[in-house]
Amino acid sequence: MLDLSLFKPNTTVAVAISGGKDSVCLLHLLSALSRSFPITVKAINIDHGIRGENSENDSLFVKSLCNSLSIPLYFEKVDSPLYSKNNGVSLEEAARILRYKCFYKAIGSGFCDHIATAHHSSDNAETILFNLFRGCSVKGATGIKKISPDGKIIRPMLQTSKKQIDDYIKANSLNYVTDETNFDDSFSRNFIRLDVSPLIKSRFPEFESSISRFSEILTAEDNFLDSLASKYLTKKSDDEYSVSKKIDDVLFSRACVMALKALGIKKDYEKQHIDRLIALKAERNGAKIDLPLSVKAACDYEEITLYKKKEKVIFPATKFNLGEFYIEKNKITFAKVPTASFGDGDLYFDIDKIPSSAVIRTRKEGDSFIKFGGKRKKLKDYLIDKKIPSRKRDELLVVADGSEILLICGIEISDLIKVDKTTLNVVKCITE
């Protein structure tokens, strides 16, 4: 009944137990397994603050059960109705969000290494139907995963049928509690479980196992498409990802979803957001759109960049000198070096050609620049030629004397400060 491949030796697994039949079965199974397999079994129980005294009594049952099995219990109470009201999500979703927050809190505290939930094949079928009815993507139709992306949440009974669980409970004479809200079909998942699934089973008795096979096939194909899409996704920083415009919309959409999730948008995006990202590919360079949770997307030449919105960078003009300077998460270092240490791709200049009035600052209107070995240009035009996105231009540090730009950190030096035969003191500009 258990997928033993999900358990790592010498780790601690906490069973998410509500006191219901499924989670009692899982706790009992893992308690027995721990006698022959090197894992430590614990339990975690969450009172979601929905059912008042009944929920409290269920938690007392769980506490008593864990005591009888000598299993340590982690308990926490949350206010799902308040979270639902304050965040505009359904009561079901609020309970799920808070439940998983508690799971990761328990893991983070060192109570356990993994959380095992009692999801089974019927749950998986219900989830797939629920997602399909809401209008999901291929990924939504893959159903519940055996293991979470970070490996912390495992579902060892996902291939186990409800009948197997019922038979195990009966064979071992195990007591359990019943959550009366499980019979309230005003909740969408309950409606599917209580009304839709039985109707389907009456015509297609094996529909749950069929959906499970469908889920496995779709998961393999979904993973393959993700592996292709990931080749066109580039991480620029923790707050910025870019996707190539020169790919099919199918792979482009997947890569964008990966970027959105990496930026913290797990479930808040909709098809309209993906459609807008696809449309952005045809817009002019510099065009932007707003996405959920303060994420933006911009058309940057040959790619679409998704990034978290930031306040405009403020860097007060500072007298030029050797040493370290910081802007955002970047460090700029000016250090003297021997002339013999020149390296390809680095910026070297003659410090004696830097006027005493020079400062380090961000760009300003009217700045101009004489490209190394080239002609004078407006700084803005030069940065456009270099394909520096407009939002990035204000983050660049420059060394300037008035409106004369002598050095663009990380980009180029002016012809005015180049190293030549007369140079005595060479300085290297290092951008990290």
Image (cartoon, grey):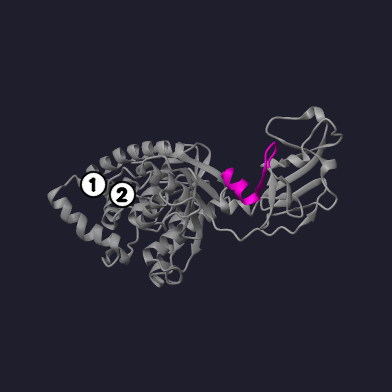
Residue 199 x %, y %: 16, 56
Q: Are marks 1 and 2 in contact (CB under 8 Å)?
A: yes
Which residue in the structure is indicated by mark 1?
A: 208
> Is-magenta flag for residue 383?
yes
Relative depth, front residue between 223 and 174 = 223
Q: Work out whether 105 lies above or below 338.
A: below
Which residue is disc 2 drawn over?
Answer: 124
Q: Is residue 333 something that shows in the picture?
A: yes
Q: Where residue 193 sits in the image (x, y, percent)?
A: 25, 57
Q: Quadrant of the C terminus?
A: top right
Q: Residue at x 40, y 72 (%)?
A: 53
Provide the residue span drawn in magenta. 371-387
Left or right of residue 95: residue 136: left
Left or right of 208? Residue 82 is right
Which of the marked residues, 1 or 2, is nearer the chain's N terminus? 2
Q: In which quadrant of the rendered view does residue 403 lie?
A: bottom right
The part of the image, by quadrant, that contains residue 336 is top right
